[in-house]
Image (spheres, helix red, strand yellow):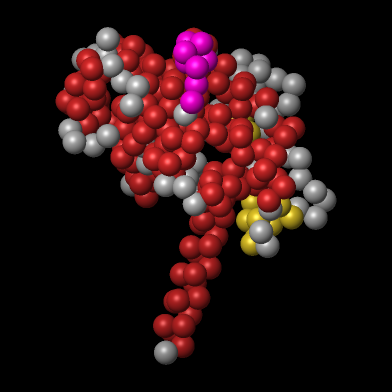
Amino acid sequence: MKKLLLLATLFIFSSHTLKDETVFWGQIGHRAVGHIADGMLTKKAQKQVKRVLGNETLAVVSTWMDDIKSDRSYSYASPWHYCTIPDGMTYETAPTQEGGDVVWAIEKIIRELKAGGLTPEQEATNLKFLVHLVGDIHQPMHVGNGEDRGGNDTKVEWFGSSTNLHSVWDSRMIEGKQYSYTEFADVANHPTKEQVKEWQAATVRDWAMESMSYRDKIYDIPENGRLSYEYSYKYFDILELRIAQAGVRLAGIINDIYK
């Protein structure tokens, strides 16, 4: 009986810790990005995506890169979820990250998909990577300052629950709205034609610098670290914007690859 209680306690503790130390945008955010992109594909791109992914949509495969984290054969991709740009630097002047980073990986994957010549498995893997990483780079905490592991070491309370700043931006604020991913996509995705054109013209490195530009707002936290309604009210519009931009840009990239 004591062993069962101990195991149960360890499970609860581990689950809580893993949730708080998450290093990826939550499922709702990623799937909202994929859902927006699904709705903006050209007919030709839709046909090619179906050829590559079968019956799975971009929304469905958007979390695949998180699902495979326990598979050591994909450990090479672990550093690809983020990049580090210290204050006062640009992506070009920041120290190079061993094993690559989210900017390097997206640029590499786009080149490979455009070049063709991949096996069906390689093409599917690259496309799944792309869907996820475009979401990641638009989550501002995935462009870290090099001081607190993208907010994972900045401890805060979210409505009285102990967590960290990264988790707040990954999932806590979104979960607080109780949206489904389709609802979140519908709420966030209202760009004008001019905005779509502008967003899709930006480079991957521009996206990283955009995420970095929100740093002052993200770290606008009280000394006691207690966050709740006021913080969400002030900054949730950033999440909506980044979700919309990620989905629109993902669609633009895939349409360009399969034009």
Location of the N terminus by quadrant is bottom left
Q: Can I make out residue 148 in this image?
A: no
Which residue appears farthest toward the bottom when viewing the image? 1
Residue 27 lies, in percent from the top left, at: 42, 45
The residue drawn where x is 17% and y is 25% is: 51
In the displayed structure, 97 sits above or below 3; it is above
Which stretch is magenta? 190-197
The residue drawn where x is 75% and y is 53% is: 225
Q: Can I make out residue 114 in this image?
A: yes
Q: Nearer the viewer, residue 78 or 195?
A: 195
Location of the C terminus by quadrant is top left
Residue 164 lies, in percent from the top left, at: 64, 51
The residue drawn where x is 50% and y is 21% is: 191
| Residue 85 within the segment the image draws in magenta | no
Q: Quadrant of residue 40?
A: top left
Residue 113 lies, in percent from the top left, at: 30, 17
Residue 178 lies, in percent from the top left, at: 49, 52
Q: Quadrant of residue 72?
A: top left
Q: Horizontally, is 155 left or right of 222 in the view?
A: left
The residue drawn where x is 72% and y is 34% is: 217
In the displayed structure, 192 sits above or below 121; it is above
In the displayed structure, 256 sits above or below 17; it is above
Q: Quadrant of residue 86?
A: top right
Q: Nearer the viewer, residue 198 or 220?
A: 198
